[in-house]
Image (cartoon, rainbow, N blue to C red):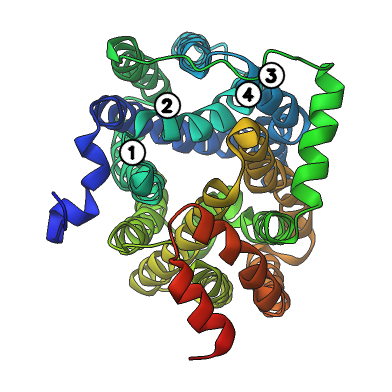
Amino acid sequence: MNDPKGLSLIFRALYSRNYRLFFGGQGISLIGTWMQQIAMSWLVYRLTNSVFLLGIIGFSSQICSFIFSPFAGVLSDRWNRHRILIATQSLAMVQAFILAALTLTGVIAVHHLIILAFFLGFVNAFDMPTRQAFVVQMVEKREDLGNAIALNSFLFNGARLVGPSVAGVLISILGEGMCFFFNGLSFLAVIIALLAMKVTFHKGPSERHHILNELKEGFAYAFGFPPIRSVLFFLGWISMVGMAITILMPVFAKNILHGGSQTYGFLMAAIGVGAVIGAIFLASRRSVLGLGKIIVIAAGIFGIGLISFSLSHALWLSLFLLLVIGFGMMVQMASSNTIIQTVVDEDKRGRMMSLYVMAFMGMAPFGSLAGGSLAARIGASNTLIIGGASCILGSFLFARKLPLIRKMVRPIYVRKGILSEKSEIKIQTGH
């Protein structure tokens, strides 16, 4: 496959055996994960009818990414990432079964949900940066890394398309507890896939420093290099001001669009459709060149979509606008991931991915908490308008950084063979 085209181009990372195993197992598991997320949000709102508590649940499940992900990144650079993932997936399975047992027996209470959300957040704080850094070990050809990252996003959001719809139906027929139970079972697929992999553990440098020194080294590397620093700050900003839409979705489904759990599932699935389209768009690209400009455009699309959705009172229009939102959100997030993974030094990959997770997931709880509090005062629609406007403002500010980012990453692209020296000379001379 020297020059793949069509579907071979889009799915070229699947020619790597380990990545193919991961793709299949994770695809099943992520459907269960989305089912649980929808069921948990719906259960909280059904039990409390409180927008603020929706924000608290979102905060509890994501704050650990902000606190613990940097430490997880250090351990990811030190330890066997394959074994870390087996452990984190197993713990997440246990959490799902506990949640199912409490719900099915009728003893579930809001404080249980907060504690279990926090526990899962703690597990994910170690799982997510490790999983992101592990991608490069699963892909046999380094040039397929960007494609594998895009396919990860395709997988995540394809599950978003299926999971919420299934959850909406299951909640109305069997209740939230069965969604949690089926999620627990779904983890078996990814655990079996991980155990079936043939992985060589590459030890890092034999000389180890104190974990805090390695943490400091990672922060200094990331924030001392303007391209990574700018991408991380912009990603964190978009996550903080824009991701409140996920915790406010039950409000739009129930109070604005006058629907039930199925409407909620369809709304979340619409975001998944847009994100899948965005993932296919990125997977079909042959090179990482030009991703900076794409990040700016995608963030602007995301912001415009948020504002438009907040003003909609028709289900069909809301579904279309959520498709636009999903596209913009996914393209901005995955492009940021690809740029960081492309330019980072291998011995710091785990730490850079932990900072990526810290920006993407770690800033979201502050947005969830602020979004829930603000929505209780000025309404969910006005909250999203503010968030959308903030995303558009951020895209303008990031666009001003692009010339410096391009100037600094081009030598890295030349060194890694992504950009030829002849092309770099032409760019510099303007010929």
Q: Which mark is first along the chain, 2 or 1?
A: 1
Q: Is disc 1 placed on a helix, strand or loop?
A: helix
Label 4 crowd (10 A; few <14 / some 14-19 / many >=20): many
Mark linked to residue 246: none
**Dot 2 lies on which element?**
helix
Q: Which residue is mark 4?
A: 77
Q: From the viewer's perspective, tell me whether residue 301 is left or right of residue 353.
A: left
User: Disc 1 or 3, which lies upstream in sequence?
Assistant: 3
Mark pair 1, 2: CA separation: 13 Å
Check if mark 1's residue and mark 3's residue have beta carbons within 8 Å: no
Amino acid on which the number 1 mark rests in the picture: Gly
Q: Of circles 2 and 3, which is in front?
A: 3
Rendered image: mark on residue 115: 3
Q: CA distance from mark 1 to mark 4?
A: 32 Å
Query: Residue at 59% of width from left, 62% of height from top?
Result: 411
Q: CA distance from mark 2 to mark 4?
A: 38 Å
Nearer to us of marks 1 and 4 is: 4
Q: Quadrant of residue 5?
A: bottom left
In three-dimensional space, the C-alpha distance between marks 2 and 3, rounded to whole angstroms, equals 17 Å
Task: Decide which of 416, 182 is in the foreground and name it.
Answer: 416
The amino acid type found where label 3 is placed reads: Ile
Q: CA distance from mark 1 to mark 3?
A: 23 Å
Q: Nearer the viewer, mark 2 or mark 4?
A: 4
Horizontal side, residue 150 vs residue 332: left or right: left
Q: Earlier in the sequence, mark 2 or mark 3?
A: 3
Q: Is residue 373 above or below residue 353?
A: below
According to the picture, the residue beneath numbered tag 1 turns out to be 163
List the residue tagged with mark 2: 176
